[in-house]
């Protein structure tokens, strides 16, 4: 079974002690590739530096909504420069997060819009983070539009109605470890309603581990538990599901 993790933070300190060992296991774990995601300009540089060292790791560069109030005036220029490296395959993660409001809503919206425009300019897919802000995020995406390359709503946490609305805009729905939580009926209903053709798999590691590893560090190999859960929900063969999910990710991020 080939698997793909489209949202990881392997450059975070939680992986400092055993990162090389973890990456060495990619092939035996069935991992085809990983998208390593930046959360601000300096963090995106670190993410890219990691991707440059390993064939199976690609990179997304962007500013997380938590960091929106801290951006410098030339941050878009700096992100644009980073995208000149062929290992950069997406813009993000960007979006809106009203759960913690670590940046003002006004700054979040402005920085989200600016990164969407950059993604459209470069025609790179966009990785969108939304938490308790689906209405505003949808409005901005509807106004500006996605790049032709598309996008993904990362760590999707809303209901079927919202999933279908974002799919209509051209988004994939990012599904990770929370799907395996027994009480997460709403997300299971989303998967059942939208089908495998609209899903890409992710971990958000080191965060959001699947049920089998609750309370522990997440890692790319644990995507297999997400694939198994999707197969169970859709009552389809795991091998076929994993192949389609890999195809979806390759399509979105233009990876051969």
Image (cartoon, rainbow, N blue to C red):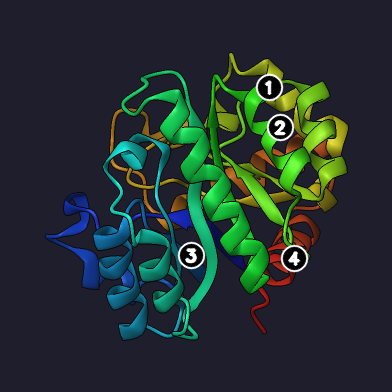
What numbered label is drawn on residue 138?
Answer: 2
Mark 2 and mark 3: Cα distance apart in space: 24 Å
Looking at the image, do the residues carrying marks 4 and 3 touch, with CB atoms under 8 Å apart? Answer: no
Which x, y percent locates residue 185? 68, 17
Q: Quadrant of residue 186?
A: top right
Q: Nearer the viewer, residue 162 or 74?
A: 74
Give the foreground label among 4 and 3.
Answer: 3
Which x, y percent locates residue 34? 48, 67
Report the residue marked by disc 3: 35
Residue farthest toward the top in the current orientation of the protein: 183
Specify which label sits upstream in the sequence, 4 or 3.
3
Mark 3 and mark 1: Cα distance apart in space: 27 Å
Answer few, some or many: residues within 10 Å of disc 4's Cα (few below 14, many 20 plus, some between 14 and 19).
some
Mark 2 and mark 4: Cα distance apart in space: 30 Å
Count of residue discs: 4
Specify which label sits upstream in the sequence, 4 or 1.
1
């Amino acid at each position: 079974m080939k698997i793909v993790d489209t949202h990881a933070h392997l450059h975070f300190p939680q992986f400092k002690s055993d990162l090389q060992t973890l990456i060495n296991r990619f092939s035996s774990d069935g991992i085809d590739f990983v998208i390593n995601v930046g959360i601000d300009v300096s963090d995106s540089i670190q993410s890219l530096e990691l991707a440059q060292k390993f064939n199976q790791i690609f990179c997304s560069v962007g500013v997380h909504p938590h960091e929106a109030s801290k951006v410098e005036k030339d941050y878009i220029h700096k992100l644009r420069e980073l995208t000149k490296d062929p290992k950069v395959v997406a813009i993000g993660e960007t979006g809106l997060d009203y759960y913690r409001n670590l940046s003002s809503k006004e700054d979040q919206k402005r920085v989200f819009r600016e990164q969407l425009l950059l993604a459209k300019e470069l025609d790179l897919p966009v990785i969108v983070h939304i938490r308790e802000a689906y209405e505003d995020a949808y409005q901005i995406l509807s106004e500006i539009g996605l790049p032709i390359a598309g996008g993904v709503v990362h760590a999707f946490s809303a209901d079927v109605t919202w999933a279908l609305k974002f799919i209509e805009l051209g988004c994939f729905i990012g599904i990770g470890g929370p799907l395996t939580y027994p009480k997460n009926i709403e997300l299971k209903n989303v998967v059942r309603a939208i089908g495998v053709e609209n899903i890409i798999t992710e971990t958000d590691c080191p965060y959001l581990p699947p049920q089998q590893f609750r309370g522990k560090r997440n890692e790319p190999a644990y995507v297999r538990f997400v694939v198994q859960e999707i197969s169970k929900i859709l009552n389809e063969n795991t091998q076929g599901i994993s192949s389609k999910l890999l195809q979806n990710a390759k399509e979105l991020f233009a990876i051969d």
